[in-house]
Image (cartoon, grey):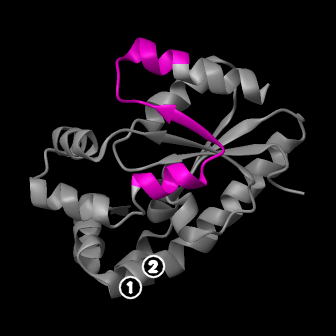
Amino acid sequence: MAFEYAVVLTGGIATGKSTVAKIFQEYGFKIIDADKIAHDMLDLHAEKIKELFGEEYVDEGKVIRKKLGTLIFGNQEEKLRLEALLHPLIFTEIETQSLALDAYKKPYLVDIPLFFETNRYPIQESIVVYISEELQLERLMERDYSSKEEAEERIAAQMSIEKKKQKATHLIDNRGNLKELQRACDRVKDVLI
């Protein structure tokens, strides 16, 4: 059965999930990265993206993710069309990787940004990485060189970090520096192993 030893790593956009994933990787945890799988699936299915959204979203067999992202974040109908294509493909790949990792009979992380939003994965245990909403906005604008309005729109497209915190099994506070984040990760790691 897939996901037997899986622990979800989630949080809001720009809360530091990737940094936490790297820390857990250094501890020896295997990571399944849903975003990487999504990017791979986009490029694998670039022709389908071209059919669904138009050839202006594909260049030399690669999906222009930023352009497609701009389209779907502003249009719920287009977002649902993209999700209808991608989510089953992503789920199947994550499930396949999960089955392989379950064979080791050790906990591993599945990094799924929209875990609570999609309610698709039968994983019981979750880690939520969180920061304040103000800091999240600031970090997202800095990371993506986006305007305040664009960043607010992307954050609003996800479940609020406060709701995710309420659903979490484990919390990792990423409002401080890297050393404080490492300590927070250490505490969760000690519970998981």
Q: Say few, some or many: other residues with alpha carbon within 10 Å of mark 1 (under 14 / 14 to 19 / 20 or more).
A: few
Q: Say if mark 1 contacts mark 2, CB within 8 Å.
A: yes
Q: Which residue is mark 2?
A: 48
Q: Say few, some or many: other residues with alpha carbon within 10 Å of mark 2 (under 14 / 14 to 19 / 20 or more).
A: some
Residue 55 figure quarter: bottom left
Of residues 126 and 143, which is closer to you in this image? 126
Where is residue 113 shown, x and y percent of the image? 49, 53
Magenta stretch: includes residue 79: no
Residue 59 appears in the picture as rendered? no
Q: Work out whether 166 lies above or below 135.
A: below
Of residues 104 and 64, which is closer to you in this image? 104
Q: Which amino acid lies under the numbered mark 2 shown in the image of this protein?
A: Lys
Quarter of the image for the N terminus: give it: bottom right
Q: Which amino acid lies under the numbered mark 1 shown in the image of this protein?
A: Glu
View extreme (top): residue: 179
Residue for point 68% across, 24% down: 189
Q: Which mark is residue 168?
A: none
Q: Which mark is residue 51?
A: 1
Q: What's the distance in space between the residues labelled 1 and 2, CA to CA? A: 5 Å
- Disc 1, SS: helix
Residue 73 appears in the picture as rendered? yes
Of residues 152 and 73, which is closer to you in this image? 152
Q: Work out whether 177 lies above or below 82.
A: above
Where is residue 100 shown, x and y percent of the image? 82, 45
Residue for point 60% across, 63% down: 90
Residue for point 12% across, 61% down: 149
Where is residue 2 shown, x and y percent of the image? 83, 55
Magenta stretch: includes residue 180: yes
Please state the extent of the stretch shown in magenta in the rendering: 161-183
